[in-house]
Amino acid sequence: MPFAPWKDRRLMHRLGLAARTATLTGREAGSEETVVHGVAAVCDPLGALYLPDAGVLVVSDLHLEKGAAFARRGMMLPPYDTIATLNILAAVIARYDPRTVISLGDNFHDRKGSAHLPDDLRSLIGAMARGRDWIWINGNHDPDGTTDLPGTSVDELLYGGLVFRHEPSLTVGKGEVAGHLHPSATVRRREKYVRRPCFATDGLRLLMPAFGVLAGGLDLNHKAMHGLFDRQALVAHLLGHDRIYSVRYANLLG
Amino acid sequence: MDLVETPSAGRDAVSLPRPFLKWFAEKGWAPRAHQLELLARAQAGENMLLIAPTGAGKTLAGFLPSLTDLTSRGKIPPGSAFIGIHTLYISPLKALAVDIERNLMKPVSEMGLPVTIENRTGDTPQAKRQRQKLTPPDILLTTPEQVALLLANKEAERFFKDLKYVVLDELHSLVTSKRGHLLSLGLARIRRHAPQMQTIGLSATVADPMDLQRWLVPQGEHPSPPAGLVHVQGGAAPDITILDTDKRIPWSGHVSTYAIPEVYEEIRRHKTTLIFVNTRFQAELLFQELWTINEDNLPIALHHGSLDAGQRRRVEAAMAANKLRAVVATSTLDLGLDWGDVDLVVHVGAPKGASRLAQRIGRSNHRMDEPSKAILVPANRFEVMECQAALDANYLGAQDTPPVGEGALDVLAQHILGMACAEPFDPLELYEEITSASPYAELSWEMFERAVDFVATGGYALRSYERYAKIRKTQEGRWRVSNPQIAQQYRLNLGTIVEATELNVRLVKRNAKGTLGRGGLSLGKVEEYFLEQLVQGDTFLFAGKVLRFEGIRENECLVSNAFTMDPKIPAYAGGKFPLTTYLADQVRGMLADPKRWQSLPDQVREWLEIQQDRSMLPSKDELLIETFPRGKRFFMIAYCFEGRLAHQTLGMLLTRRMERLGARPLGFVATDYSLAVWALNDIGGMIDDGRISLTDLFDEDMLGDDLEAWLDESYMLKRTFRNCAVISGLIERRHPGKEKTGRQVTVSTDLIYDVLRSHEPDHILLDATRRDAASGLLDIGRLGDMLARIKGHITHRDLDHVSPLAVPIMLEIGRESVPGEAQDAVLQEAAEELIAEALS
C-alpha cells in the first residue's frame, strides 16, 4: 500500500481509502466473498456489492444532496456530502468497471434533490454512467424517480436470480438484496466496542450498508431488523479501515 | 449578630430608609459595613463587585441598592403607564433563583416594602411568562438562558428600558463557561436598551478580581473604569483536617472504601454531615457502602445530577428541614443553596482544586464568625499529598479559579441569530456592541463577519446555500431573519449547555411469564454512550441500587432489581475534575521538599523515603522519567503532574513518536499525576544508547504535525465538535420526548465533522472546535506550558524493577481500557475467530 502523507489523512477514511485503492481488486482491495441465494457476491470495503457473474455493481442509500435537504429546512450542513459520496462511487466503479450499476433507493435525500442537483455534480454522474446500464431503484425518500439523470427508475428489479428492492420485504426474503435500514454491527472484545456499517446476510437475503457519507447506521439488534434473518446463519461483513471483517452474528459480542 | 463598626461605614454616611432601620432594630441586627459600603457606592453610580465568603449576607448586600431605591419610589398607582423591570437578578441555577425569591420575600414582606418580586425560569408556565411581559415585576429573578430569550424579542427594549440594576450571583462560576460568554453578550445588549443600568456582581473569592471587575463594565475601544471592589475577608479560619487513620491508605484508586467505618463514625458524631465526592460513581459507591454498615439506620441520602429531579427536590427539602443526618453529593450541591444546619463537611477523594475545596467547605456553618469544620479523606497516597496541598492553600487563601478566557465562537453565532430575531441589526453597530463584552473585546471584524456569514448560510466556501439563507441583508444594509420559523427554531435551540444524549432509567418488574411490566419508578438519567456498552443481564450501580440492564424501549432504559451487591460493570464516571495547575504545582513542591513531608502521615512519608532511596524524587521544575521491565513488557513512567486530560493527550502523542522510533509501544494509561507507557522493546535501553532522545521525544514540536495527525482520528474532538455544532445552531438540539422515532431523528455530527474536515478544514466551526479542545478536553494549552517548562530539565532513571512512586499508576493499568487506534485490531480478533472456525 502506498504511503499516505499526513495531509491525506485529513480525508475521511472512506474517501482516503477510495483514493488509495481504486486500482486494486479482490483480496488486495480488502473485499470478502459471499453467496446470496446461490449467487456469488463480493463485499467491497468501500460499501458496494459486486456480482461478478452478471457484472452488476450494487450501492444503496446514497442520500445525495442530504446537506442541501437540511439547508432547505434551516440547518446548514456542509454542502460537500454529494461530491464526497460520488468520489467514492467513482472509485468503486473504476475498480470493477461493471456492466450495470444498481442504486438501491434513497438515491437522493429528498424529492427535490435530483431536480436541484448542481450541474457539475450532474455531469459527474453522467460520466460514471457512460457505457453502462444504470438503474435507480426508488426509495422512500425519493419515490418519484430522478430528474434529468441517465438511467432508468423502477420500484424493483429481478435480475440474475436476485430481486433488488429498497425496503426488505417481510414476507419473501429469498434472493433479496435490499437497503433502507443502514445496517451496522457492534463488535465487543475485552470490554472494547467497535461499531461499523456492515453488509448483513444469512445466505438467503442480503442487506446493504448505506453508501452516502452522511448516512448513519442502525444496529443489527434494532427491532426493525427482527424477523429478517435466520440468526443462526447471519454473518455481518463489517467495513473496516481498509478491509472487510466478517463476523458471525452470534459472535459479535464475544 | 453584632453591629460591625468599620471606618468605611462612617465615611460613606449612608442612611437606610426608615422601614429598613426599624426591621434591623426589631431583629436585633445591624447592617454590616460591606453592605453599607456597597449601597453607598452603588447609589453614587458605580458598578460594583462584592467578594465575600458564604454567610456574609451577600444576597442582602446585592439587593439593598434596589430595595432602597424602590422604597423611595413607592407604590406605582394603578393605571400608570408601562414601567419595565427595575432589577434583574441572574443566577447560574434555576433552584437558586427560586431559593432567593423565598429568602428575599421574607424581609420585603416583613418591612412592608412596595416591591414585587417574581422568578422566571424554564419551569415558569407560559401564561405567567406572557403576563410578566405585559406587567413586569420590579425585581425579576432568572437565569442566563432566560435573559437571552427575553432579548431575542421585539419587546426587549420596552421590557428593559427602565432597568437600574443587574445583580449577578455566583459570578465566579458563571464567567468561566460558555453560559458566561452568552450572558456577557446579553449584558452588552441590555446596556443599549438601558444605558443607565449598573451591574452588581456577587462572588466567592477568586484568583484575580480584576478580571471580574472588568467583566462587569463595557470594554472595547473606550472601556469604562472597572467596577468598584468590596472585598470581605473570610471569617474564622476553617478547621480542616485530613482523616487520621490506622488503616492502610491504598496505593491507587478513587473510592476511599478503606475509610467508610471512620466516615460513618463522624456522621454519628455530628448533627448533619455533607459528604462531597468528585464523580457520580464515587457517590453511588460510597452511598451503598455507608448503608451496608448503617446499623443505626441513620437517614443518609444521595444527591447527584443524574438522579431524577423529583428525587433531588425531596432530598433538598428534607435537608432544609434538618431531617437528614448525611447527604452524599457531587458538584450539584456546590453552589449557594441554603442547606440547614450542616456542621461537618467530609470531602472524599482529593478536591482537585483549592478554590473548589474552599467553596465546598463554605457549605458548613452558615454563620461566618464560627469556623467551618471539614475532614478530607484521600483515596490514595498521591491524594494525601494533594489534600495536604489543598489544605495549605485554604489556610493561605490561595486561589486557583480558572481565568475568564476568550469568548467562544459558537456562542457568538447563537447570539448573532438571537439579535436578528429581536430586530434587524446593523453589522457595525452590533460589532461595536459585542466587542464591549469583555470576553469578546479582542474579536476581530473579520471573525465577526465570518460568524455572520456562518449564521446566514453556513459560511461555506462553496456558496451553494444563498437561496436558503436564515438571515438576509436588507437594502438598508441591516440583517434580518428570513422568516418567522427561524426565530422559533432559535428559541428552541438556545442555550450553551449541551447534555450528552441521556435516557431515562425506569425500574420495572418481571412478571410470572418473565416478560417486562410497564410503568415503574423513574430513577434518573444515564448517558446513552454508557448504555451502549451494556448487554441484557449486565448489572451496574445507579441511584444507590445495583440494577440489572433489561433493554431499551423507545427513549427509556429498562432495569430491574439485581438482588446482588456486586455490580458487573463498575465504571460510571460522570464529571471528573482534573487537577488544577495550582494544586499540581503545590504537590510538585511538596515532593521536592522533604521538610514538608513532616505534615504527611507516616505511611506516606515512608513511601516517599523509599522512593528517594530506590530511585529519586524530582525537584520542582524537573521531569522525572523512570523506565523498568516488568513481565514481558518495558515500562516508561513520566511524572508530569499536569492532570489526567493533559496526560492523556501526551500519551497519544508520545506513543505515536515511540512507534516511529521503533519502541513498539502497546498502550498507555494516564492519572492526574503521571503517565505510564508500555512497549515490547526496551525503552530504557533505547534511551541509554541514544536511539531515543528524551529531549526530542518531549519536544514541543509534538504539538504540531503529530497533534494534527492524531486529531484526525480523535473521538474527543468529535465530541467537542458536536457541542459547537449544537450551540452555534448548525444542528438542532434533541428535545427529550419530541424526537421522532426511528433513525431519521438526527444526522450524526461525527459524519458531518468528517465531511467538513475533508473539504473545508478552515471552516469557522472547526476553528471553534480546535479552540475549545485546546483548553477543554485535550488540555493542549497546559501540555504546551509543561513541555516548555521541562525543556532541559528531564532526568531519566533506568531501574531494574518498578519504583514505589510508580506503583499507583501501575495498578491503574488494566482498570482502564487502553484508548487509541486499536479499533480495527478488535475487528481483526473477531474475524479471526470466524476463520479459525472455518478451518477447523
Image: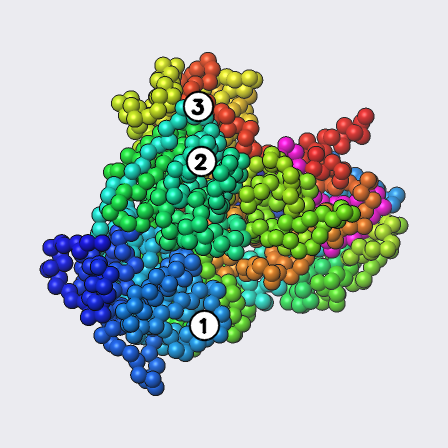
| Of the pair B747 and A177, the residue shown nearer to us | B747
Q: Amino acid at mark 2?
A: Tyr
Reading the image, the residue beneath label 2 is B264
Res. B129 mark: 1
Have a look at marks 3 and 1 and say if they share a chain. yes
At 13% from the left edge and 56% from the top edge, which residue is drawn? Answer: B8
At 24% from the left edge and 61% from the top edge, which residue is drawn? Answer: B27
Q: CA distance from mark 3 to mark 1?
A: 58 Å
| Of the pair B608 and A225, the residue shown nearer to us | B608
Residue B828 quadrant: top right
Q: Earlier in the sequence, mark 1 or mark 2?
A: 1
Have a look at marks 1 and 2 and say if they share a chain. yes
> Does residue B546 appear in the picture of this structure?
yes
Q: Amino acid at mark 3?
A: Arg
- Disc 3 or disc 1, which is closer to the eye? 3
Report the chain holding disc 1: B
Report the chain holding disc 3: B
- Disc 1 or disc 2, which is closer to the eye? 2
- Disc 3 or disc 2, which is closer to the eye? 2
